[in-house]
């Protein structure tokens, strides 16, 4: 009986160590625009209301430097049961409308799979964002 209790406790601790925490999403991510193929970095941070937001912190497009600082995703909340971030809204520069979104962390926290969609998630697109350590230097003319 003592062994069974010890196994249960050890299993619970092991499972807890692999469990994702809500703030695991925080950081800098590299992404390629699915429409223009331009490269950028986004920072995901915690907003004052406790949800998660993303803003552009770098782009390789010299003409697109005015996009740096743009908050383009808001309202993500962590759903521990589904192990994903849900309820986000994305405003895509140059496109009309607001897209719904959800995000999953994969590859041990190194990749985000961000899905943006209209209506139901079946009608959308998933974009991979790769975690990076720091913001890249601004491009020079």
Image: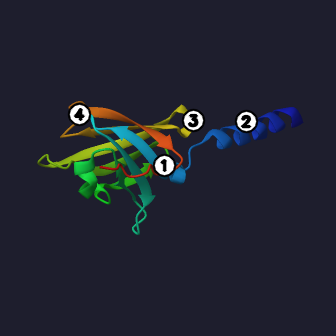
Residue 110 location in percent, x, y?
Answer: 52, 37
Q: CA distance from mark 4 to mark 2?
A: 38 Å
Task: Judge whether 39 appears above or below 69 on screen.
Answer: above
Q: For mark 2, what is the residue?
A: 11
In screen coordinates, is 19 left or right of 121? right
- Whether the residues at callouts 4 and 2 have beta carbons within 8 Å, the answer is no
> On the picture, is 120 further left or further right than 81?
left
Say what secondary structure mark 2 lies in: helix
Mark 1, mark 2: which one is toward the viewer?
1
Q: Is residue 87 above or below residue 14?
A: below
- On the image, the x and y values in percent for residue 135 come to 46, 51
User: Which label was assigned to residue 124?
Assistant: 4
Whole-number angstrom distance, CA of label 1 to CA of label 2: 25 Å
Q: Residue placed farthest to the front in the image?
A: 141
Q: Position of residue 63 (x, y in %)?
A: 22, 50
In the rendered structure, which disc, 1 or 2, sits on the residue that comes first in sequence? Answer: 2
Label 4 environment density (alpha carbons within 10 Å; few <14, some 14–19, many ≥20): some
Q: Could you tell me if residue 90 is visible in this image?
A: no
The answer to which of marks 3 and 4 sits earlier in the sequence is: 3
Secondary structure of residue under mark 1: helix
Q: Are marks 3 and 1 in contact (CB under 8 Å)?
A: no
Residue 25 is tagged as 1
């Amino acid at each position: 009986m003592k062994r069974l209790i010890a196994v249960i406790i050890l299993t619970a601790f092991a499972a807890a160590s692999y469990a994702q925490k809500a703030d695991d999403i925080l950081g800098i991510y590299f992404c390629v625009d699915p429409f223009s193929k331009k490269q950028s970095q986004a920072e995901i941070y915690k907003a004052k209301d406790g949800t998660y937001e993303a803003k552009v912190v770098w782009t390789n497009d010299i003409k697109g430097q005015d996009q740096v600082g743009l908050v383009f995703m808001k309202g993500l909340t962590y759903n521990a049961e589904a192990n994903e971030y849900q309820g986000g809204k994305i405003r895509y520069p140059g496109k009309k409308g607001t897209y719904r979104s959800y995000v999953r962390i994969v590859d041990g926290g190194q990749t985000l799979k961000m899905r943006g969609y209209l209506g139901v998630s079946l009608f959308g697109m998933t974009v991979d964002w790769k975690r990076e350590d720091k913001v890249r230097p601004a491009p020079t003319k």
